Amino acid sequence: MKTRHDNTRQHVLETGQRIIAGKGFASVGLNEILTAAGVPKGSFYHYFESKEQYGQALLEDYFARYLADLDALFAAEALSAQERLACYWQRWLDKQAACAEQQCLVVKLGGEVADLSDPMRETLRDGTGQIVSRIARLLETGMADGSIPPLDAAATAQTLYQLWLGASLLAKLQRQAQPLENALQFTRQLLSR
Amino acid sequence: MKTRHDNTRQHVLETGQRIIAGKGFASVGLNEILTAAGVPKGSFYHYFESKEQYGQALLEDYFARYLADLDALFAAEALSAQERLACYWQRWLDKQAACAEQQCLVVKLGGEVADLSDPMRETLRDGTGQIVSRIARLLETGMADGSIPPLDAAATAQTLYQLWLGASLLAKLQRQAQPLENALQFTRQLLSR
DNA sequence: AGGGTTGATTAGACCGGTCGTCTAGTTTCT
DNA sequence: AGAAACTAGACGACCGGTCTAATCAACCCT
């Protein structure tokens, strides 16, 4: 009962994430998601209050996993902070280059959702804040272990994240990885001075 | 006849631009736009083939004006290239800070539209390309007149534009200008070395 | 142990709004 | 006056999210 509950809920979240990452939020109907998930429409409102609340839950789930990945990577003790960070950017590039369907929900949904739903906007705001602050923390680690030159960690982390968000957007518009490669090159240059 | 034609068409484009800049593309119906414009629905399909084609026309119109503004600013001979560029970024910041409703359609629609409509994606791609190349050209001018240090103009222009797109997105999520101020500070630092 | 009760889950009806079409009608210019 | 450009808005087919009523599963109490 509880198990089943959670499974169904989680299953709907994951199915929706894949579809919404491709088509956006407003232009996808519940029907499409629920059909794909094999869950009847009627059940939806048992698990979620509304489409909006569902969207928020979806983003929360997304960030939870994203941040868990990040923590795993950033904790890798075998590598220097500089290497861990390089690995993060490289992954970002690889992931987006690999599949046409967007992975980064911040880029995909940020613009659309920001003035559409406050709860979703806040979830995105908090999630991106977490990401930036983890990058900042890693930068500090890197300055401490000497693998990264001394910089203002918070400002640099934000700048880098902004740069990569913009690069993702351009890459999406151009359907090629060049903007991300540009960002990577710039990032390398910035952190190796 | 031609005049009237153009007026109505243009009026629908401008009204739609305001509404769509606030709510996104998919979540706005033609009805809302046409009611706001005071144009009956029947006329719409005289001027546009479909909602998609309308969206593309809207973006073309947007970029045409954006680029015209840009050209006017970048041609200001009283200022050094460095000053002209600084003015561009400052305007970006001011405009976004002033009105909650998003001005930059690239940020607002980029993520949403990229996998929704190829014509719209291509229009965005070309428009952003034009912007970046104008920035690059101005950077070169600045290197020639000595107001900007020597850099790879193309790569730097792209990096800066990416940075500002990402900053716009974060500012939208946070509903405050701080990310843009961060971008501005970084930009200044980069161009004054 | 088994029947009844309770809460979790499903099914699908429902209303309103969507895009796009289509036929009449009006205006404008030649 | 006639032809073209343009407007008007009803209409159809469909799909959106929501909600109510029925079904199902699990547990409790006698």
Image: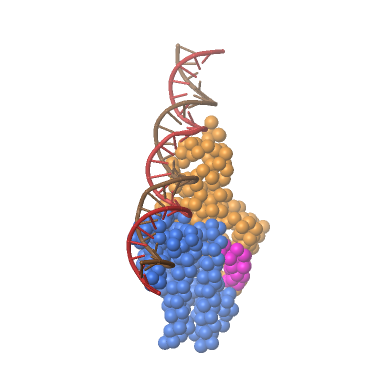
Chain colours: A orange, B blue, C red, D brown
The front one of A122 and C12 is C12
Quarter of the image for residue A164 reads bottom right
Quarter of the image for residue A146 reads bottom right
| Extreme residue toward the right, this view | A78
Residue A187: in magenta span? yes
Residue ID at (57%, 45%): A15
Q: Which residues are magenta?
A: A168-190
Relative height, residue B71 to residue B62 (above, below): below
Instruction: Classify residue D7 as left or right of residue A185.
Output: left
Residue ID at (47%, 55%): B26
Instruction: Classify residue A83 as left or right of residue A62.
Output: right
The picture places residue D3, in percent across and down from the top left corner, at 43, 67
The front one of B50 and C1 is B50
Residue ID at (58%, 66%): A174
The front one of B77 and A77 is B77
The picture places residue A179, in percent across and down from the top left corner, at 59, 68
Majority SS type along the magenta span: helix
Image quadrant containing the N terminus of chain B: bottom left
Residue A171: in magenta span? yes
Residue A39 can be seen in this image = yes
The front one of B69 and A140 is B69
Quarter of the image for residue B122 reads bottom right
Relative height, residue C10 to residue A102 (above, below): above
Instruction: Classify residue A184 as left or right of residue A128.
Output: right
Residue B167 can be seen in this image = no
Relative height, residue B55 to residue B155 (above, below): above
